[in-house]
Structure formats: C-alpha cells, structure tokens
Image (spheres, grey):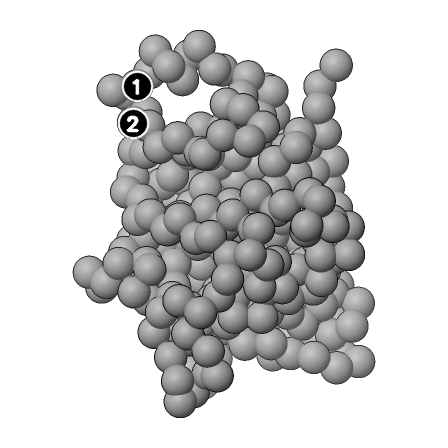
C-alpha cells in the first residue's frame, strides 16, 4: 500500500505579504509549501507562510519526545522567500535537526545569506544563536537528494554518476533540482518523486513563447505542478510599468507549460500582491476554462497525490 504523499500550501503570495479581508479567501502570506511523504517532512521556501506551518508542527509534536527532523529547500534567497525563517518555531528547539538546501546567491554561500538575514541591529538574534542543529548545503543542477531511511541524513547524489544507486531506490523519496535563469539571479525548480508519484515546484519562473521547454521536460507527467502565475496579460505587457522580464509568468504561460508537460493537475502560484480574492477567482475561472484540473493555490489547501 502506498504511503501518504500530500502537498499543503502555507504561503501563496508573491513579492510581499498582503494581509486583510480582501485576501482572506486565497491568502496573503509569501511562499511556503509543506510536503509530507511517508514520515518525511519537506518544506519549500520560507516566506511568511512558514510561520503558521511552524506553529502547527510545534503543536503536533512533543519536541522532547519526538524530535523534529525537517528538510528545508530554498528556491532562491529573495526576501519574500526567506523572510519567515527567523520566526520558524521548530528552529528554536535544541533537539530539532534542520537540513537546509538551496543555491548560492551571487557567489554567497546559502549559510552566509541566511546569516545576513538575521544580523543585529535589524534582528535581535543571529542564526548562530538558534539552538537547533543546522546542516546547510549549497546545491547545483544535476544533484539529487535521496531519503532512503526514516532517520538517516539525506544523501546528495548525482543524477548520472549515481544512477545505479538511484535505480535501486526507485520507490524512495528523492528530490531533483533544475536551475532556471528565467528569474533575476536565477532560481531552483524542484521535483519531488515518491513511490511513483511526483510534485514539481516552479515558482518565480518566466516562461517563453512556445512554453519553457526545459521545464516541460523536467515536469513531464507530474501529478501536480505548482507554477508561477503572478501576472495577467495586461499587467505583463500593458501596465504603466510592464512586467515583462521581471521573472514571473502569466496564468496563460502556466497553462501552456502544464499542457506541454502533460501534468495531471496545475496549481497557479505566487499571486500578484495587487490582486484581491475576487480578481484571483476570476483568473481561476479563465484558467479552468482553458485547462481542466487547474486551480488557484490557496493557503491551507492540501492536495493528496
């Protein structure tokens, strides 16, 4: 019997948080997605959505009896994808082990970037003062993170060089990495594979005419694709300040990529902060008319794969 594999959206907004009644139905927190695969907890990005996730995890677990072992993947280190990390409650427990993976940023190691984000006098404590155990590692395209046991440290392998090991663990949880230049300073796109099912997280990506072919290949046949869909056509091309080249897609681009990749479900993600619930729900209707099995990612929504 297949083990549970769920994707929960904790933050779905792009650029900056937008709290208030006008965004209550879809959500105003910045990016964070929680994946449960069997006994493993994977977190993608640490926008303000990770704060609520941390509270929930802390309520579910008794840290002194059932220590956290969590893995956090950063797509990139722009502020809206890191700003919740200092307030992530599980990082305040001594028995927590937090594995952190992500890209270098402008030749700065990931650990250094996180340190700079919690540097007094703009924050009361440093990263080094967090009591949890942290294992931080830069990733590069072509590496695969393999989880082949409930408690073992994730292994970082090479997709081709370690193909034999990966084949032997074909049903195990693994995370593939694709680096995209379709966002300023670049961004990582992740594919989570577990027991024949897959989830692709493609935020902060700007598509191309004819769809983004590298992403199409990477996401091919996925059960769920969460794809950046921040802009409407009007905002992308005809606003007083057009957004073309800013590193984000329109919902039509997301639909085109999902169709080309033949994914089962498409979640529109990284919502424009200027769009309220009514606007996003209208976009959802248009996208669903263009492609069935498409939906607007909403905070608190859980998808079972």
Marks 2 and 1, Cα distance to the nearest angstrom?
Answer: 5 Å
* Farthest-out residue, left: 107
In the picture of the structure, the residue carrying the numbered disc 1 is 162
Q: Position of residue 126 (x, y in %)?
A: 41, 74
Residue at image position (68%, 50%) is: 64
Residue at image position (57%, 36%) is: 199
Q: Position of residue 293 (x, y in %)?
A: 71, 39
Q: Residues within 10 Å of mark 2 (few under 14, many from 20)?
A: some
Where disc 1 sits, the SS reads loop
* Residue 210 showing in the rendered view: no
* Residue 44 showing in the rendered view: yes
Residue at image position (23%, 63%) is: 108
Q: Nearer the viewer, residue 284 or 304?
A: 304
Q: Identify the image quadrant of the C terminus.
A: top right
Q: Nearer the viewer, residue 9 or 55?
A: 55
* Farthest-out residue, bottom: 121
Q: Which mark is residue 242?
A: none
Where disc 2 sits, the SS reads strand
Toward which corner of the image does residue 265 lie, by quadrant? top right
Q: Residues within 10 Å of mark 1 (few under 14, many from 20)?
A: few
Toward which corner of the image does residue 303 lie, by quadrant? top right
Q: Position of residue 162 (x, y in %)?
A: 30, 19
* Image marks 2 and 1: residues in contact by CB distance under 8 Å: yes
Q: Position of residue 132 (x, y in %)?
A: 51, 57
Residue at image position (71%, 44%) is: 65
In the picture of the structure, the residue carrying the numbered disc 2 is 158
Q: Is residue 169 above or below residue 280?
A: above
Q: Is residue 141 above or below residue 15?
A: above
């Amino acid at each position: 019997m297949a083990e549970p594999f769920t994707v929960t959206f904790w933050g779905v907004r792009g650029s900056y948080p937008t709290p208030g009644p006008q965004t209550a139905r879809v959500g105003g927190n910045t990016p964070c997605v929680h994946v449960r695969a069997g006994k493993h907890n994977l977190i993608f990005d640490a926008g303000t959505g990770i704060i609520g996730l941390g509270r929930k995890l802390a309520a579910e677990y008794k840290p002194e009896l059932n220590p956290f072992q969590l893995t956090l993947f950063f797509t990139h280190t722009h502020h809206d994808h890191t700003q919740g990390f200092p307030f992530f409650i599980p990082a305040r427990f001594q028995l927590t082990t937090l594995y952190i993976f992500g890209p270098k940023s402008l030749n700065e190691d990931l650990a250094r970037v996180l340190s700079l984000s919690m540097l007094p006098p703009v924050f009361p404590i440093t990263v080094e003062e967090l009591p949890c155990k942290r294992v931080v590692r830069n990733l590069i395209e072509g590496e695969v993170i393999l989880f082949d046991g409930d408690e073992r440290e994730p292994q970082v392998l090479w997709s081709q060089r370690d193909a034999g090991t990966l084949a032997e663990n074909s049903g195990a949880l693994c995370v593939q990495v694709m680096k995209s230049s379709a966002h300023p300073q670049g961004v990582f796109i992740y594919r989570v594979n577990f027991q024949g099912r897959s989830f692709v997280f493609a935020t902060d990506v700007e598509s191309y005419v004819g769809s983004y072919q590298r992403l199409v290949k990477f996401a091919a046949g996925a059960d769920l694709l969460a794809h950046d869909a921040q802009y409407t056509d009007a905002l992308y091309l005809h606003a007083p300040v057009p957004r073309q080249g800013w590193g984000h897609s329109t919902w039509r681009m997301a639909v085109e990529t999902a169709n080309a990749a033949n994914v089962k479900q498409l979640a529109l993600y990284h919502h424009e902060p200027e769009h309220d619930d009514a606007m996003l729900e209208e976009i959802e209707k248009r996208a669903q008319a263009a492609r069935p099995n498409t939906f607007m990612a909403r905070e608190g929504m859980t998808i079972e794969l």
